[in-house]
Image: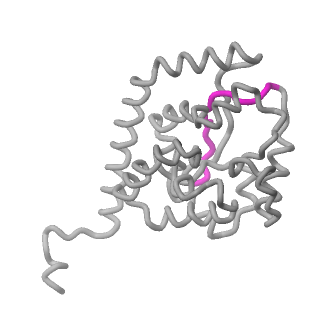
Amino acid sequence: MTDLARSPYSRPHSQLRLEQEAAKRVLDIAVSLSAIVALAPLFVLLFLLVRSTSQGPALFRQERLGRGKQPFTMLKFRTMYTGNDDRIHREFVTSMLSGEQPTAAARGVLFKPAADPRITRAGAWLRRASLDELPQLFNVLRGEMSLVGPRPVLPWEEEMFRAADRRRFDVKPGMTGLWQVSGRSRLSMRQALDLDAEYVRRRSLAFDLLILFRTLPALLRGGAG
């Protein structure tokens, strides 16, 4: 046994991982709670904007898969008219995952088709600014999501994943992640899924901080959200 292995400061990989996860959870709670308090006036304004520009609730609730494929209810500000089905989104995602990449004009934001008639005018603005995602701070605070992690997926999307894609369920989904700060609008969906898998392999508190640091510039460029 080497001196390093005998050192009282050396720790098994599993212990290091647990310590990293504990630190990540502390960061999630501190940042999400602080952001919710600081952004409370903005939450109220966005709530009123959604309610006053189209009929329906201000918040949109949707089942997504979290860590270990456990379902949870993800929150967003509603960006679509009520009473719509998800046929357009299903067809778009299915074509992307099958390798049939839409044109740049039709593609819009990755995972979201452009020219979607279901989206309200206020919703289009909320999506461009990524403000529709802000209610997910409550998902982070509740422990269902993390600030950084793979994109939370719909149950039917998971059915089309490759085995390697399912590594994403080893961690909590995130509000932002590696693919969002890596040129999202230029990526294929498969490339985005590969970046999610890469995040799972490389995950650490330092890596999370780096992604968070890069998220704001990406948002300002329209490259995250």
Q: Residue furthest bottom?
A: 1
> Where is residue 80 shown, x and y percent of the image?
75, 30
Give residue 203's quadrant in the image: bottom left
> Where is residue 114 shown, x and y percent of the image?
78, 44
Q: Is residue 122 positioned above or below 89 on the image? A: above
Give residue 195's quadrant in the image: bottom right
Q: Is residue 72 magenta?
A: yes
Give residue 54's quadrant in the image: top right
Q: Is residue 189 visible?
A: yes
Q: Nearer the viewer, residue 127 or 168?
A: 127
* Colour approach in the figure: one colour
Q: Is residue 117 positioned above or below 87 on the image? A: above
Viewed as shown, does residue 109 lie left or right of 181?
right
**Residue bounds of the magenta highlight:** 68-82
Q: Residue at x 72, y 16 (%)?
A: 53
> Where is residue 11 shown, x and y percent of the image?
24, 68
Q: Is residue 198 positioned above or below 88 on the image? A: below
Viewed as shown, does residue 109 lie left or right of 180?
right
Q: Residue at x 82, y 33 (%)?
A: 118
Question: Disc count in the image?
Answer: 0
Work out which quarter of the rendered image holds the N terminus and state it: bottom left
Q: Is residue 103 magenta?
A: no
Work out which quarter of the rendered image holds the C terminus and state it: top right
Q: Is residue 169 visible?
A: no
Q: Residue at x 42, y 48 (%)?
A: 212
Q: Is residue 132 positioned above or below 182 on the image? A: above
Q: Residue at x 52, y 42 (%)?
A: 220
